[in-house]
Image (cartoon, rainbow, N blue to C red):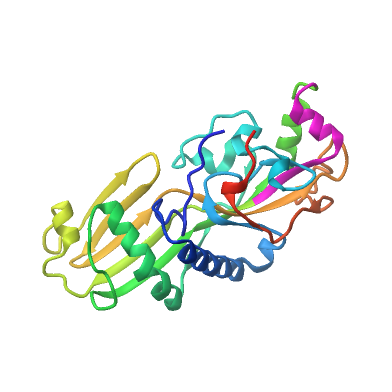
Amino acid sequence: MKKTIKFALCATMLLAVTHLHAQNYNEILINVIKNEFKKDLKGFQFLNTPTDNYGLVTTYKKNTDPKNFECDMYNCIGIKAPGSADAAWLTMNGFAAGGDNGRKITLSQDVNDQVGFNLILPKIMKIVGLNGNFNKNTVKHLELTLGPVYIRQLRKSVMQDYLNKLDHSSRQYQLFNSGQMVLIVGDCVIQSMDVDITLADTTETSIDAKFGWQGSSVAAKILDSAAIGLKVAKKSAGHYQFTLQHPVIFARLAKKQANAGELGLTQDQDFNDWATVDPDAIIDPDKLGKK
């Protein structure tokens, strides 16, 4: 199984934060997204640290206790995971259904103030390679936007076809045939995050100096690594936008098959005949089992 890349605040920012700050932040984020999607996330589990793994198609036996973990996402369907920037990552090679347009969520001023100055900006600046004091005295405007945010659903007929073609002696087929298979049939994906700031003092900014930008010129720079993609754009003098470009899974829906050897009626794409497993649980990816 590939190494899971974890993020606090939709990839905030692959750098260590204190346990207390991470807990406080994730509680705020969970409440924001729950309020935005309401009943669409009924019964979903939430990942206490959003991750690029353990979403759609992830498989368990009986329940989602880590000791019952079987396989994760692409590993479950025998496909090498594409890069997160690849469109196939979101569609999972046809296994995932979702709307064409995700929803963007602009966070409230309270959330901006609570986490923007104390957590997000310092982490972004560290990634960029800058040390600076960005607070309410130096920043006139700060706006955080999550998304697009997608709720994906497992295509039942595609999954059924895959399982039917498995070697009947395989562990995965035997689990499916036993009636004890638990699948992640839906998940909530945050594709990116924008941080928009306007600095109070635009005469000499460390950001301009870092990238060799001058005056009111419009420019952009993309910082890429195996872990994160960060786009830094200068909109005008003193006005910058940072875009974190690595999708992460924030919540997921686990259900247990209703009958052995089948996924149920093809026309019931919502898996309504399946029982929801461990609804509203808070999941720690660090504690998930590995095969």
Reply above or below: 258 against 142: above
Judge whether 8 appears above or below 257 on screen: below
Figure check: 171 above or below 130:
above
Residue 122 within the segment the image draws in magenta: no
Residue drawn where x is 34% and y is 50% of the image: 230
- Extreme residue in the right direction: 259
Residue 155 visible to the viewer: no
Residue 91 quadrant: top right
The magenta stretch is 169-186
Residue 182 in magenta?
A: yes
Q: Residue at x 69, y 66 (%)?
A: 39
Q: Could one spot residue 40 in this view of the protein? A: yes
Q: Position of residue 185 (x, y in %)?
A: 70, 47
Residue 139 in the figure: left or right of residue 226: left
Q: Position of residue 245 (x, y in %)?
A: 40, 50
Image quarter where the N terminus lies is top right
- Residue drawn 61% across and 44% down? 54
Direction front: furthest residue: 19
Residue drawn at (84%, 32%) of the image:
177
Q: How many marks?
A: 0
Q: Is residue 71 above or below residue 229?
A: above
Instruction: Give how far across and how far down residue 160 sits, in percent.
Output: 76, 35
Name the quadrant of the C terminus: top right
Residue 71 percent location from the top left of the image: 66, 36
Relative horizontal placement of residue 47, taking residue 59 as reference (left or right): left
